[in-house]
Amino acid sequence: MKKPPKVRAQSTTPAQSGYHTRMNDITPQGTIDTATGKTAPAELSTERVKTIFSTIARKYERFNAISSFGAYRRWLGGMMNQAPIRPEHDVLDIAGGTGDVSKYVARTKHPAHIQLTDLVPEMLDVARMHKARGAFGSTPVDFDVVDAQDIPYADASYDVVTMAYGIRNMPDRPRALKEMHRVLKPGGSLVCLEFSTPPNPVWRALYNVYLKHLIPFWGGLITGDRDGFVYLAKSIRAFPDQEGLAQMMRDAGFTDVTWKNYTGGIAAVHVARK
Ligand SMILES: C[S@@+](CC[C@H](N)C(=O)[O-])C[C@H]1O[C@@H](n2cnc3c(N)ncnc32)[C@H](O)[C@@H]1O
């Protein structure tokens, strides 16, 4: 059963639709270079991310598994433990990539429907391949190319938004978080897995060495795209810590923001409520 996207309102204004507030109608905010955190035109980060993920799409999962020494799976498991997803829920997976989060949601939560979205069509092509092989079981899953900073769906249309390693790659994070808040139903939740900052200084120093030297080495070896992994390491180092991300979520309108650290704070799962 193909579930149609909720709203495709490229030319619709809030006054015309009566219920859907497009971010294009809201005062634009500053954008950053996601590799440095410094002010820069959005196109810089957007074009880079499109190039990187369209190039590595087919090798992305192998790299993830190897570079995190398997911790990636544990973090996804932790994300599922914290995700308040019930069988009647409609779930929106933002920056869903090749579909790992959606697969875990489908297998562990069996929601009514998952909308698996990403900016890069090549990543979604891999996810579609997984679907063809039955990776999502009996859970209905639909795919859509979506920029999280301008989500083409109606207000209050999803019960839970999931996002893993997505927000760090977005040049206008406040806008993306506001969009996720907008499409959630009142009482709905955002569940966000992202790299973060280990609070212990010794662990943090070791991790920084790993990021700076080993990640580009491993990434280059496995995917042939060393530059993509130099970017990955830089973007992780430039990303706000746990409290910084929590505050961004509060600023976007979320409440009850909590987080749990994994592997000493290398990754964190934030849960926030609308
Ligand atoms: C590191 S991958 C994570 C994919 C998947 N969530 C996972 O856990 O394997 C980051 C993904 O974010 C996507 N992305 C980057 N910027 C985006 C944006 N503005 N809107 C939607 N997706 C975006 C990329 O295309 C890429 O697939």
Image (cartoon, rainbow, N blue to C red):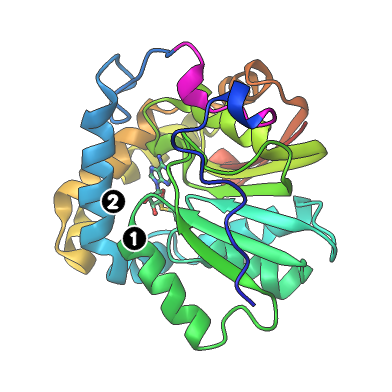
Kindly identify the residue that appears in the image at 48 percent across and 40 percent down. Answer: 148
Front residue of 200 and 153: 153
Give the label on residue 144, or none.
none
Place residue 61 in its image quadrant. bottom left
Q: In the image, is residue 69 above or below residue 239?
A: below
Q: Residue 121 carries which label?
A: 1
* Residue at the image position 49 percent from the left and 55 percent from the top: 117
Q: Residue 215 carries which label?
A: 2
Magenta span contains residue 21? yes
Residue situated in front as seen by the camera: 8 or 83: 8
How many angstroms separate mark 2 from mark 1 (CA)?
A: 25 Å
**Residue 10, percent across and down?**
44, 37
Amino acid type at circle 1 is Pro
Q: Which of marks 2 and 1 is nearer the N terminus?
A: 1
As drawn, the residue found furthest toward the front would be 16
- Which secondary structure class fits the magenta region best? loop
**Where are the magenta residues, as a range?**
18-27
Q: Position of residue 202 (x, y in %)?
A: 48, 32
269 and 166: which is toward the camera: 166
